[in-house]
Amino acid sequence: MNRPVDMAASLDLGLAWHNRFASLGEAFYTLRAPTPLPSPHWVGTSPTVADLLGLDRAWLSSPAALDAFTGNLPIAGTQPLASVYSGHQFGQWAGQLGDGRAILLGEVDTPSGPQEVQLKGAGLTPYSRMGDGRAVLRSSIREFLCSEAMHALGIPTSRALCVTGSPAPVRREEIETAAVVTRVAPSFIRFGHFEHFSHHGLHGELRQLADFVIDRFYPACREAPGSPYAALLEAVSARTAEMVAQWQAVGFCHGVMNTDNMSILGLTIDYGPFQFLDAFNPGHICNHSDTGGRYAYNRQPNIAYWNLFALGQALLPLMDDQQQALDALEPYKALMPAALQRRMNAKLGLGRTEDGDAELTESLMKLMAADAVDFTIFWRRLSHAVAGPIDAVRDLFLQREAFDAWAQRWRERLQAEPGFDAAATQSRMLRTNPQVVLRNHLGEIAIQRAKQGDFSEVARLQNALEHPFEELPGQQDLAAFPPDWASQIEISCSS
């Protein structure tokens, strides 16, 4: 039975908390307080997320904040809970899942809209299955840094307020230490929430959830012709198309695009075995657990559609017929490629899309793949080459004559742009093609130092990732080619 959490001796953060998800009723969650951790310490904080929530930056480093966001001290006004959902994992129906180590504290209204606050790694819940309800330091640092990095890149994402650590042992492939990430998003509702109620024939709860999402986040669907639930599916598809196009354009691999890891708001959530590409390989698999390559970089757009199809199936009981769902999904097939081409054109310095741009992009990608060209460095150097020599870009290729031919076509296409100005184009490209991304080896260096109690590299890397388009002094190493050992890093679903 759901029982209220004892909030005696709770901490007042001065925020007006709401518990709107809890208002859906007991079928959607179990009330569960976080489980305390011993001897917590700070690992990292995000002052900009503190600003978003209306928290004082200075207070965020206080002992009270440390206890609150480790789950050791109840927060007044919150109603901690773990939500239930189901989903498909690696293409197979996995049955009931749920928040196995994440606890939703509640929701805060902000000038940017409502924001839910969730503690990941906060202890056992009824949905932990065989897990321990904990997160480890290495994965928590990666999620914290990548959440803020993706936000700075302009990609829809959950945010991360802070990471706290504890010496409490956690067993994975080896004994590690525990950590808690405080995650923030307008909603953590996933495709899997809808799948759960649909699969179990709980159509009343399914409709209640869909109405909740429409009324809060997609009100235009209520006025759309036909079924509002078909309109919801189409709107989610459009947001997902834009998000995945942004992933592809920046070379981001999610690594575990299960339906329970897909946000109903088109946000990037659940940072596990993610990776930003080093050498460009369209078939790159970043997740060591993904033995079949289901979630390889070049498969992400189609997997997103597969997941949307699963969402459509879940919503079928609310629609008139299957065709409504298929019609709602159909626009994705054109929206995603068009969104990606717009992004690639921006990376190339092109202000408009013309016939031939897709072929120009595709031929470049083939050249980059053939020579395993570093993805981020190529685009950054190309940005500088608009108003300067192209030698540094050419040096990245083995097939230099082939690159020369492509570069000639690219320059001709640039010069055909109305009012083309090399300096202005270069400036736009430098604001589009990042100098620094969260490469695996950069995260690994920060993690290894953090394991020794030194969190300075986490802070340095965080600062660079929050300004990804700037060439910050003293941080050239963060924009350099990866070391040879980087290719040996294995990231799996274990966290």
Image: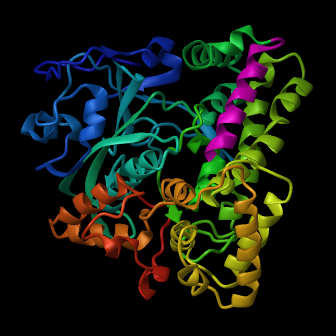
14 on left or right of 360: left
- The correct choice, above or below, for 316 with respect to 494 in the image is above
Q: Nearer the viewer, residue 92 or 159?
A: 159
Q: Give the overall secondary structure of the magenta segment.
A: helix
Residue that appears at 29% across and 69% down: 475
So how many labels did they put on this image? Answer: 0
Residue ranking furthest to the left = 63
Q: The N terminus appears in which quarter of the rendering?
A: top left
Q: Position of residue 409 (x, y in %)?
A: 77, 71
Q: Is residue 106 visible?
A: yes
334 on left or right of 171: right
Residue ranking furthest to the top = 223
Coloring scheme of the render?
Answer: rainbow
Residue 31 image-quadrant placement: top left
Q: Nearer the viewer, residue 403 or 411?
A: 411
Please provide the residue range marked out in magenta: 225-243
Q: Position of residue 141 (x, y in %)?
A: 32, 57
Q: Nearer the viewer, residue 193 or 455?
A: 455
Q: The C terminus appears in which quarter of the rendering?
A: bottom left
Q: Is residue 399 visible?
A: no
Residue that appears at 26% across and 55% down: 178
Q: Nearer the viewer, residue 47 or 186?
A: 47
Q: Position of residue 119 (x, y in %)?
A: 33, 38
Q: Position of residue 153 (x, y in %)?
A: 47, 50
Confirm whether the magenta stretch covers residue 481: no
23 on left or right of 357: left
